[in-house]
Amino acid sequence: MEDLFERTILIVDDEEINRILLGTIIQSEYKVIYAQNGKEALEKIHSYGSAISLVLLDLLMPVMDGSEVLKTLNQEGLITEIPVIVLTSEKSSEIQSLKLGAADFLTKPYDSPEVILARIRHSIQLSEHSKIIHATEFDKLTRLYSPEFFFEYASLFDQRFKDKVMDALAINFTRFHLLNQLKGRPFGNEVLNAMADGLRKALLKIGGIAGRNEADSFYLYVPHQEDYDIILQKINESLSSLLKPSEIRLRLGVFSDSERKFPMIQRFDHAVQACNSLRNKTSTTSDIRLYDAKMAQKEVFDAHLLQDFESAIEEKQFKLNYQPKFNIKGDKPVLCCAEALVRWEHPELGFVRPDLFIPLFEENGLVTKLDRYVWEESARQIRRWKEELGKTIPVSVNVSRVDIVAPDMTDFIEKIVKENGLLPSEYHLEITESAYTSDQKHIIEVVENLRSLGHKIEMDDFGSGYSSLNMLTSMPIDVLKMDKAFIRNIQPGNKEMKLVELVLDIAKNLGVPVVAEGVETEEEYKMLKSAGCDIIQGYYFSKPISPNEFSRFV
Ligand code: C2E
Ligand code: CA
Ligand code: CA
């Protein structure tokens, strides 16, 4: 049976007797092909490519000699792909051939067949090993270290320089996926390459090593610095030919561990955490954050919450509050509906705000279990109010982007709505704008489905910076909820107010009403009313309140 992994060796010699001699020795282990001069050899190498495992190359030949072949292979970069053993009778040409990249040499008259075979085997093995190493040592795209090697080298560095204070750094391009989506992956790759170039330049100044973890996540292990602006500066410079300054938003997390108390991986986890804590900042510039005591506390707090999640669900520690929304189109504001907002009444930690646990539970998928609990409870509440007050108060529930991934989400909603005898139109869903940017095709499908059942879909936090207008026109939505940030600082005629007017304009063109949330004062309310806003939610009318308070309120 033919060995699938049989290796091919090219013998290049102008003298037939030599070809036969060598061929006879090695054909017991290898497939052999021949060339009579350098020119023919190059032709064979080009057509066989890396199917040739090794070349045995005579130096003195007519037409094109061996040195010429070596030079060409060098120029073409093939010498690192295919090892060459030089055949020579002159001691002096050995050095010359090695300089030209030959892997080894065999001197004529030849040694015993065993020695020849052993040297061939050795050269092939070396070359194959180094190919394997190079395949994983470097990240293919950026030529920075792959994560495994990066950690390996960082640990080696620690062993060698025991007293040096080293920092772990994590670098990211904020919302890189959007760049990929809007400008295409090849462009995204160019950006990553430019980032890597910038990093290399920064390392020339401060020392240390760099690796790419995945996608747009880079790691650096460097001697401790007082400030790290130089890194952002070098990356910025390097990106300046591809992006406008306003499009570049880098974040850098630093973990400094002068006593080397933590294992390498954990140091980088901390750096990543510091880096990620900058993820949702709305500032438009690049930013640096150190992992500090506060973050360490937060980590402990998070671990506490994660550990208590299951029992909290069982013991019904999650409570729902409802915040009324008012239609302000007419003379007097009219209560029209409400939003369900979850709170955690934790037995030890006390009242915990949702923004402390929702993002955490989104990271590990727990949010879906929590949200389904909230959704079901909200459906029951609508029914209770119906019975108690004799009227329907439609409620909107929050949907996390993570929830949408579950294939049975729509079924679940359909079920709880039916079980409580509700109409789908009485049950609204708030989906945050940022969810629309991850997997558009899927989300459109889910939303279309829910709408066809009769549910109303509200786009939450609209304007918080994710979507393009272009995207908005293709989105099936029933209501726009303007992000709270828009309402802060509105004054007649100022920039903020102009933005609000713009959003109202967009909504009018799309034919959907606008909810303004976070309205706290009478002035804000009046400005929004005269600008044509439809619905208002905020402390001005009411904070989120318990179901009982809500009944009294009505
Ligand atoms: P959101 O969906 O944008 O909810 C509105 C937030 O604004 C609520 O914060 C509400 O209490 C607050 N708010 C309302 N009126 C005013 C006002 O006049 N001024 C100010 N400063 N704030 C006002 P809350 O309840 O702390 O919830 C925070 C976020 O947590 C929510 O933002 C939502 O993204 C998330 N969340 C809350 N409940 C749930 C839930 O059941 N499931 C999911 N997935 N997320 C939830
Ligand atoms: Ca909401
Ligand atoms: Ca919102």
Image (cartoon, rainbow, N blue to C red):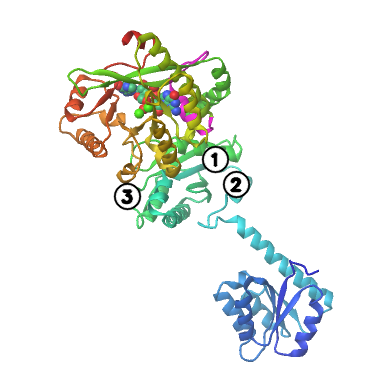
Q: How far apart are marks 3 and 1 (CA)?
A: 28 Å
Question: Few, some or many C-alpha atoms within 10 Å of disc 1 (few <14, some 14-19, many ≥20)?
Answer: many
| Residue bearing the label numbered 1 | 268
Where residue 91 sits, quadrant-wise, is bottom right
Residue nearest the observer in this picture, 510 or 160: 510
Query: Is residue 291 highlighted in magenta?
Result: no
**Where on the image, by quarter, is ligand 3?**
top left
| Residue bearing the label numbered 3 | 245
Up the image or down, 99 lies above or below 457; here it is: below
Residue 498 at x, y percent in the picture: 19, 36
Residue at (40%, 36%) from the top-left corner? Answer: 280
Query: Which circle, 3 or 1, is nearer the viewer?
Result: 3
| Residue bearing the label numbered 2 | 151
Task: Name the quarter where the N terminus is drawn.
Answer: bottom right
- What residue span does the magenta drawing correspond to? 342-365
Up the image or down, 205 lies above or below 292; here it is: below
